[in-house]
């Protein structure tokens, strides 16, 4: 029996010597250390032994079992750690390979120009305010003194929102000027100084200088003793702050229903420094927006007594300001989503 045992142990160890992976090791275990394995088989024959032989053989069997289990444990530990090392080796990340560049975004040119404008107006005490892009006809036109059938409405034709019968007319605002009324309603009868930037819409023939959706910023100052001289001085500081200290400003008479007197503001062309070039159509001047003294009717609609209060207002296009500042040839580039254009700024 002992011989049988030694043979089985020898065979098991010899086979274990040839095991080189965990699958084979597990197969070995289920052959030699299982209940149906050769050692268990030999144990079962112990019943036939005499009482003296039994403990001796029993000890020998246990020693053989322990020896096989130890060899198994050692090999299992070694193979597991080898498998782990091989796996790490396989999954190794080559940190020396060049990475993929992160594509950094940037602010849209209109946002950059608006921030510049907000900074300059901020130094003159203007607070940035927002007002709705979807407006009632009353705020977009009526309260701004546009008579019902005046041709000035045609020049600012826009998109009408379909509303249930009997509702007030609703439009996509054609300019930021309705924000004037909203700011006056909020602050009257206190003096007010606000800047209102935002998107505007017009039913427009799209050209190199006109879009259906564009941006404007409105400025409004209402107080006591505000004059056209204050408007001109403020515009002068604004133009110098945006285009540089040598920039000049001129006002040309114009017409808006909501200002009286009204003017178009021109700045000296910053490309040719006023000498005349293609950009300024050889006049030396570039127009950037309309302005004027707030009409008494509008002051009253806003909640101010025009006998006591006066004010100035204006509405300019930041796209036009950027076009002039950077020599851009077409306004359609702004909403083109073309990175070749956007990444230049
Ligand atoms: C107005 O919109 C007046 N609300 C401005 C104003 C405000 C006058 C307060 C007096 C007091 P106008 O239609 O001229 O005015 O537009 C002003 C500026 O908006 C233009 O000079 C231009 O820079 C820009 N703008 C107007 N229409 C378009 C368009 N279709 N595409 C791009 N920019 C435009």
Image (tube, rainbow, N blue to C red):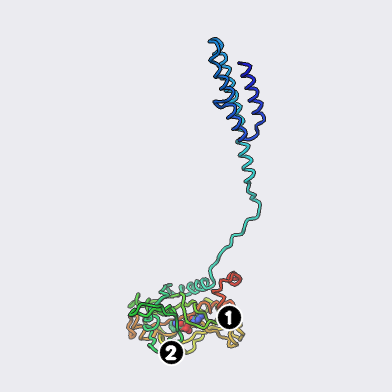
Eye-nearest disc, 2 or 1? 2
Do the CB atoms of the residues marked 2 and 1 lie less than 8 Å apart? no
Q: Secondary structure at mark 1?
A: loop
**Location of residue 176 in the rendering, given as x and y in whole percent from the top left corner:** 43, 78
Task: Choose the circle earlier in sequence order: 2 or 1.
Answer: 2
| Disc ID at residue 61 | none
Quarter of the picture containing the C terminus is bottom right
Provide the residue designation for mark 1: 270
In the image shown, does 241 or 148 lie closer to the viewer? 148
Provide the residue designation for mark 2: 151
Q: CA distance from mark 2 to mark 1?
A: 34 Å
The yes-or-no answer for disc 1 within 8 Å of ligand 1 is no
In the image shown, does 119 or 205 lie closer to the viewer? 205
Q: Residue at x 58, y 76 (%)?
A: 326
**Location of residue 313 in the rendering, given as x and y in whole percent from the top left corner:** 43, 81
Quarter of the picture containing the N terminus is top right
**Location of residue 262 in the rendering, given as x and y in whole percent from the top left corner:** 44, 87
Q: Residue at x 46, y 77 (%)?
A: 200
In this view, 262 is above or below 68: below
């Amino acid at each position: 029996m002992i011989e049988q045992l030694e043979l089985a142990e020898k065979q098991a160890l010899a086979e274990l010597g040839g095991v080189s992976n965990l699958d084979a090791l597990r197969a070995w275990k289920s052959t030699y250390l299982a209940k149906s394995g050769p050692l268990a088989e030999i144990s079962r024959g112990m019943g036939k032994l005499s009482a003296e032989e039994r403990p001796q053989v029993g000890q020998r069997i246990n020693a053989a079992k322990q020896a096989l289990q130890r060899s198994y444990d050692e090999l299992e530990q070694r193979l597991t750690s080898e498998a782990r090392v091989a796996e790490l080796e396989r999954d190794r990340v080559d940190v020396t390979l060049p990475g993929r560049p992160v594509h950094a975004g940037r602010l849209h040119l209109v946002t950059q120009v608006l921030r510049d404008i907000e900074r300059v107006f901020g130094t003159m005490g203007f607070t940035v305010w927002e007002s709705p892009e979807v407006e009632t006809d009353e705020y977009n036109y009526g309260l701004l003194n546009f008579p019902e059938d005046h041709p000035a409405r045609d020049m600012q034709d826009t998109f009408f929102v379909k509303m249930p019968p009997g509702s007030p007319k609703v439009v996509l605002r054609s300019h930021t000027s309705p924000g004037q009324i909203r700011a006056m309603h909020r602050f009257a009868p206190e003096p007010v100084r606000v800047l209102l930037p935002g998107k505007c819409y017009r039913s427009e023939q799209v050209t190199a200088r006109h879009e259906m959706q564009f941006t404007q910023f409105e400025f409004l100052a209402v107080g006591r003793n505000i004059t056209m001289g204050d408007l001109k001085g403020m515009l002068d500081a604004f133009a110098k702050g945006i285009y540089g200290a040598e920039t000049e400003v001129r006002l040309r008479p114009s017409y808006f229903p909501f200002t009286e007197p009204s003017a178009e503001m021109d700045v000296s062309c910053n490309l040719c420094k006023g000498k005349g070039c293609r950009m300024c159509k050889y006049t030396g001047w570039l127009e950037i927006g309309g302005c004027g003294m707030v009409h008494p009717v509008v002051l009253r609609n806003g909640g101010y007594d025009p006998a006591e209060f006066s004010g100035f207002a204006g509405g300019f296009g930041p796209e036009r300001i950027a076009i002039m500042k950077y020599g851009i040839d077409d306004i359609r580039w702004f909403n083109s989503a073309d990175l070749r254009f956007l990444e230049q700024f």
